[in-house]
Image (cartoon, coloured by chain):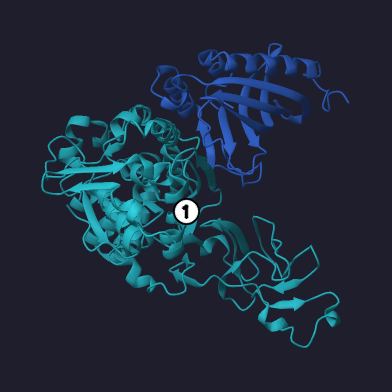
Chain colours: A cyan, B blue
């Protein structure tokens, strides 16, 4: 493994004068990408999925997490496991369906080895051919080194020595809990599986960028106006005044949220939309929240805490109920998974209204996400000039000046953690300005 | 095989009529005459749907996440956005080519004619060529020798929108 010195000079962080720059080679360099795999993705708690995707014994989901094929398996013993999806014999994928239920066995078709839903090796054709030293019991499907189930959110780490989940999450845990307190949460059927021809870190930045909304997403606000709704984010000159001062909250270990005006008791656009399309259902739902939490906390749970990043690659966007994770397969390409995470107890009209609102913005066919894809792919094309145009600027609001609209502190927090991990393999000591 | 449901007062509808309608529709889309395309829909009850790539073709958009689930107000807004230049993913506009084939009349439900067709839509942009492949599921209302679209459901065969990334034009 190389030392981190090739990365050390790639972030220019001048807190005194208020200048923050990122060297564009971090978006294109293959060695940096390999180092990210080793020092970030192999050394973090990563989001793998939600229990509602495989709720019963015999249910499973397969997907790729951090470049590895895994099975999220609900065993016949009712235990949740993340199993490495490779036969212990010669390597073939043992499960080749996207998802399933009522499964009793995973059978590798190559030579017929059979594993149960706990991952135990249960059948080997012609087992007599092996010596006495051959240990069948030691050849179960390999579980991921670490797994943690937090209220149905399944996290994985490929680092056996990683700190505890709670320690890693730091102050992001109560923010995640705020999201999960909305109800008995489930991932709604229908997953966004898409991609961008762009570096993964651009999507981290973009997913919590208040500055671009009024420009990139003008068409979304066009739709909102046709619905008779307003958003302060659509007003470039006042967006900062309304959004930024209470804006960015560092949550430790590179996690960060840009918080919503709902924390100040203000109505969000999504709430106005739901009132318009599912008023009586929403009223009933709100009454349930107030009953559970009291009026003040119910408002915060309903409004959500913000757009937040759980470092390095889980984005949660409360006002659209989005869970989004992504992984790079090369410096200039990432695969993205997105879900709507909603309360099971939603009455039908409320569920429909939430999905209509969600699709109003989100996903490859939404009124906003495609323009983000376009923008980030454009950035990536622009980076082909990185030898001539070396630096991107992320200095907005650095000296606390928020008069000109939303700042970029949330991105600097990400980059400071990224830089510390890449150079020292430890968390950043301090990520603020 | 000819029409599966060629009986009753609307017996005169032929596959050729459906083909003519779909080919003309494809031409409107490829030439970005989206206002005229929008006029093909039943203006009250029409809809344009694209289920997610992991869902059954007949999934219900009120309980399932779709890629696109536009009723007429949303579809009108989508077309306005596409024509206004505000949709950066389609400004400048993609070049597209809709190839429509295997047109079949599936049956009838009251006044509604059910038709299907296979498609490949090529999208050319920034030196990438992204093929969108699948089946159209139409619910059509016969109307003076032509049709009004009650539902246009685009069922993608793709396992994921990779590397396509988006469905920003009309598939």
Can residue A65 be seen by looking at this rendering?
A: yes
Residue A34 in the image: state x and y as whole percent.
Answer: 47, 53
Residue sticking out furthest to the right: B1
Q: Nearer the viewer, residue B101 or A408?
A: A408
Quadrant for the N terminus of chain A, please. bottom left
The answer to which image quadrant residue A206 occupies is: top left
The answer to which image quadrant residue A217 occupies is: top left
* Total marks placed: 1
| Residue placed under numbered mark 1 in the picture | A34
Q: Residue at x 30, y 51 (%)?
A: A415
Instruction: Specify whether A42 is left or right of B144.
Output: left
Instruction: Specify whether B141 is left or right of A205.
Output: right
Residue B15 in the image: state x and y as whole percent.
Answer: 79, 19
Residue A277 in the image: state x and y as whole percent.
Answer: 40, 40
Q: Nearer the viewer, residue A227 or A179?
A: A179
Residue sticking out furthest to the bottom: A132
Q: Is residue A89 above or below residue A134?
A: above
The answer to which image quadrant residue B49 occupies is: top right
């Amino acid at each position: 493994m190389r030392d981190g010195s090739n990365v050390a000079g790639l972030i220019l962080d001048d807190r005194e004068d208020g200048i923050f720059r990122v060297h564009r080679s971090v978006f294109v360099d293959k060695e940096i990408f390999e180092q990210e795999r080793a020092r970030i993705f192999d050394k973090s708690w990563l989001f793998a999925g939600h229990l509602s995707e495989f709720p019963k014994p015999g249910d499973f989901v397969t997907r790729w997490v951090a470049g590895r094929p895994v099975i999220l398996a609900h065993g016949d013993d009712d235990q949740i496991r993340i199993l490495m999806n490779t036969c212990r014999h010669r390597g073939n994928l043992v499960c080749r369906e996207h998802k399933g239920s009522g499964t009793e066995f995973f059978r590798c078709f190559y030579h017929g080895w059979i594993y149960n839903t706990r991952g135990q090796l249960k059948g080997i054709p012609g087992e007599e051919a092996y010596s006495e030293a051959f240990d069948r019991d030691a050849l179960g499907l390999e579980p991921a080194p670490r797994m943690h189930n937090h209220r149905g959110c399944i996290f994985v780490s490929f680092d056996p020595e990683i700190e505890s989940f709670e320690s890693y999450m730091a102050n992001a845990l109560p923010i995640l809990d705020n999201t999960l307190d909305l109800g008995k949460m489930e991932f709604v059927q229908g997953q966004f599986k898409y991609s961008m021809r762009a570096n993964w870190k651009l999507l981290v930045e973009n997913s919590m960028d208040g500055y671009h909304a009024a420009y990139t997403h003008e068409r979304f606000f066009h739709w909102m106006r046709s619905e008779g709704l307003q958003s302060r984010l659509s007003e470039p000159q006042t967006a900062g005044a309304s959004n930024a001062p209470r804006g960015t909250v560092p949550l430790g270990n590179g996690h960060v949220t840009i918080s919503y005006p709902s924390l100040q008791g203000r109505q969000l656009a999504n709430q106005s939309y739901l009132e318009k399309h599912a008023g009586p259902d929403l009223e009933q739902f709100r009454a349930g929240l107030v009953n559970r939490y009291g009026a003040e906390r119910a408002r915060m749970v309903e409004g959500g805490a913000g757009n937040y990043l759980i470092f390095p690659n889980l984005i949660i966007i409360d006002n659209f109920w989005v869970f989004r994770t992504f992984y790079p397969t090369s410096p200039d390409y990432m695969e993205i998974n997105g879900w709507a995470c909603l309360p099971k107890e939603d009455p039908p009209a409320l569920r429909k209204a939430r999905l209509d609102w969600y699709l109003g913005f989100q996903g490859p066919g939404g009124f906003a996400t495609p323009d983000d894809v376009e923008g980030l792919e454009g950035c990536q094309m622009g980076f082909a000039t990185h030898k001539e145009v070396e630096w991107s600027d992320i200095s907005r609001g650095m000296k606390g000046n928020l008069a000109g609209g939303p700042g970029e502190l949330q991105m600097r927090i990400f980059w400071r953690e990224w830089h510390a991990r890449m150079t020292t393999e430890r968390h950043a000591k301090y990520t603020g300005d | 095989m000819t029409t599966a449901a060629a009986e009753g007062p609307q017996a005169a509808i032929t596959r050729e009529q459906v083909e003519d309608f779909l080919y003309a529709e494809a031409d409107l889309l490829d030439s970005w005459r989206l206002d005229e395309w929008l006029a093909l829909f039943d203006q009250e009850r029409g809809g344009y749907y694209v289920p997610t790539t992991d869902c059954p073709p007949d999934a219900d958009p009120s309980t399932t996440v779709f890629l696109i689930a536009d009723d007429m107000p949303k579809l009108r807004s989508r077309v306005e956005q596409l024509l206004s230049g505000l949709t950066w993913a389609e400004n400048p506009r993609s070049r597209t080519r809709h190839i429509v084939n295997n047109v079949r009349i599936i049956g009838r439900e009251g006044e509604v004619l059910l038709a299907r067709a296979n498609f490949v839509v090529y999208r050319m942009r920034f030196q990438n060529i992204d093929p969108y492949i699948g089946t159209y599921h139409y619910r059509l209302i016969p109307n003076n020798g032509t049709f009004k679209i009650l539902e246009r459901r685009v069922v993608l065969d793709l396992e994921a929108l990779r590397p396509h990334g988006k469905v920003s034009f009309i598939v």
